[in-house]
Amino acid sequence: MFPEIVHIGFLHVHTYGVLLALAFLTAVWMCARLARRAGIDAEAVTNLAIYCALSGMAGAKLMMFIVDPDARHDIFSWASLQAGGVFYGGLLAALAVAWWYMRKTKLPPLETADIFAPAIALGHGIGRLGCFSAGCCWGIVCDRPWAVTFRNPLAANTTGVPLNVPLHPTQLYESFAEFIIFAILYRQIRKPHGKGAIISLYLMLYGATRFVVEFYRFHEQGNLWGGLDTSQYISLALFALGASRFLVFRKLDGALTAARG
């Protein structure tokens, strides 16, 4: 669509990079806001967000090289360096770093995870708009009225998106879903809730969303296993984890309510 905002001589300002930076800053701001509301050290949460962002970018790249055979043969190409990577790789790496940092700083794990859940959804929604602007993470051929057609040669050269072909706007599907998930989580976190209930709800909602979106996305990640791709198997695992934890928290909340009554 619009892979560049500015192109003057040697100066190139890519839309994807601008939106990615905006996504990061917005997510950090949201984390700090929710931390102050919850009475948790906002500075420590902000530092954690920065560490998670850096590790997330590295993890996303690593996952891309693991699941995409073509990327492995061209690791140091400009296209590979510009690619955003696989979100789940970034999420798993960020979770590992978050676990380490929370143990080090003694941040409450479940409460901190609850704070991060709405921020992740909001930032991811903005980031997917960057994917749409660049042309990456494109969908399969679409004959629906809302199909999108990429025509910018720069997008094709950078991401490989096919030009002049109507495609499912999978980036917009996921972005729209993420904004809805953010609205749900932000509403829930402002209500009384059990520790870990918000992050569990996020894992359920995003896992279900990503599982469905993958059916309409062009698979750059190589072969499918049993009709599903890598991201869908991870989606199922995260949904199961979130559902099991969410049900536990619901039962605990119900027991506490009955005890008070």
Image (cartoon, rainbow, N blue to C red):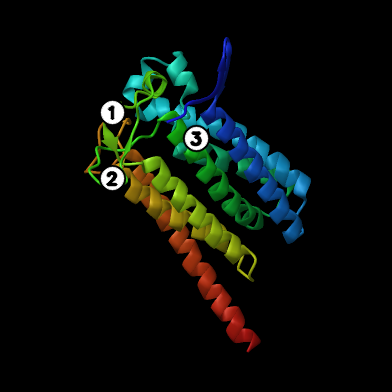
Foreground residue, 202 or 258? 202
Query: Residue 63 got which mark?
Result: none
Residue at the bottom extreme of this rendering: 261
Instruction: Please give the residue where the numbered disc 2 appears in the rendered image.
Output: 215
Name the residue rendered at 59%, 64% in the picture: 187
> Which of pointers 2 and 1 indicates the residue nearer the eye?
1
Spatial separation of the CA atoms under disc 2 and disc 1: 21 Å
Number of marks in the rendered image: 3
Number of other residues with Cα within 10 Å of mark 1, as a class: few under 14, some 14 to 19, many 20 or more: few
Quadrant for residue 153, please give it.
top left
Instruction: Please give the residue where the numbered disc 1 appears in the rendered image.
Output: 164
Instruction: Please give the residue where the numbered disc 3 appears in the rendered image.
Output: 130
Number of other residues with Cα within 10 Å of mark 2, as a class: few under 14, some 14 to 19, many 20 or more: some
Report the quarter where the N terminus lies: top left
Name the residue rendered at 44%, 13% in the picture: 77
As shown in the figure, which amino acid type bears the numbered disc 1? Answer: Asn
Q: In this rendering, is residue 157 above or below 53?
A: above
Measured as percent of width and height from the top left, residue 248 is found at: 50, 68
As shown in the figure, which amino acid type bears the numbered disc 2? Answer: Phe
Q: Earlier in the sequence, mark 3 or mark 1?
A: 3
Spatial separation of the CA atoms under disc 3 and disc 2: 21 Å
Q: Mark 3–mark 2 contact, CB under 8 Å?
A: no
